[in-house]
Image (cartoon, rainbow, N blue to C red):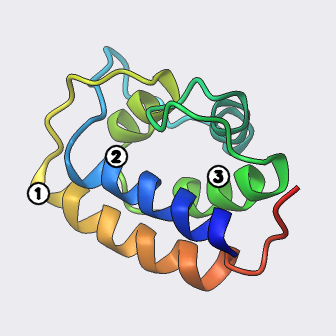
Amino acid sequence: MKLFTKTAAAVSTAVLVGSLAACGGSDRPSQQEIADSLSSGDSALGTAVPEEAADCFAKVFHESDLSDDALQSLIEGDEDFEASDEDKEAAEDVQTDLLEECSDVEAQ
């Protein structure tokens, strides 16, 4: 549970402070692309998330109201993005959803 809470806090902090970078396209990354980035440590978190948690987090992110650009920049690990007000609001919802949907995921 500690790992989950720490990871969820890092995820939401990364999104809320706008540490996501804008990318050229606006195609929404797939759930698998998000999970792969989170578990590899290449995401804006800068640290690898256990695979089972990454899968759960990816589902929440993919189904969220975060913009395609915000999700793309999350998986690219860039740090220059200025999050819109809409993305900041969506990030708050993501944090709540992560706690509700992924808090029972076992750390590996």
Task: Give the numbered dot on residue 14.
Answer: 2
Q: Amino acid at mark 2?
A: Ala
Q: Toward the viewer: 94 or 79? A: 79
Q: Residue furthest bottom?
A: 100
Please indicate whether residue 36 sits to the left or right of residue 82 in the image.
right
Q: Earlier in the sequence, mark 2 or mark 1?
A: 2
Q: Earlier in the sequence, mark 1 or mark 3?
A: 3
Task: Give the numbered dot on residue 58.
Answer: 3
Please indicate whether residue 103 sits to the left or right of residue 104 in the image.
left
Q: Toward the viewer: 77 or 71? A: 77
- Disc 1 to disc 3: CB gap under 8 Å: no
Q: Which residue is mark 1?
A: 85
Q: Amino acid at mark 3?
A: Ala
Label 3: few (<14), some (14–19) or many (≥20) C-alpha neighbours in 10 Å: many
- Disc 3 to disc 2: CB gap under 8 Å: no
- How far is mark 1 from mark 3, CA to CA? 22 Å
Helix, strand or loop at mark 2: helix
- Disc 2 to disc 1: CB gap under 8 Å: no
Helix, strand or loop at mark 1: helix
Residue 104 drawn at (x, y percent): 77, 81
Which residue shows up at 58% across the image and 34% down it? 47
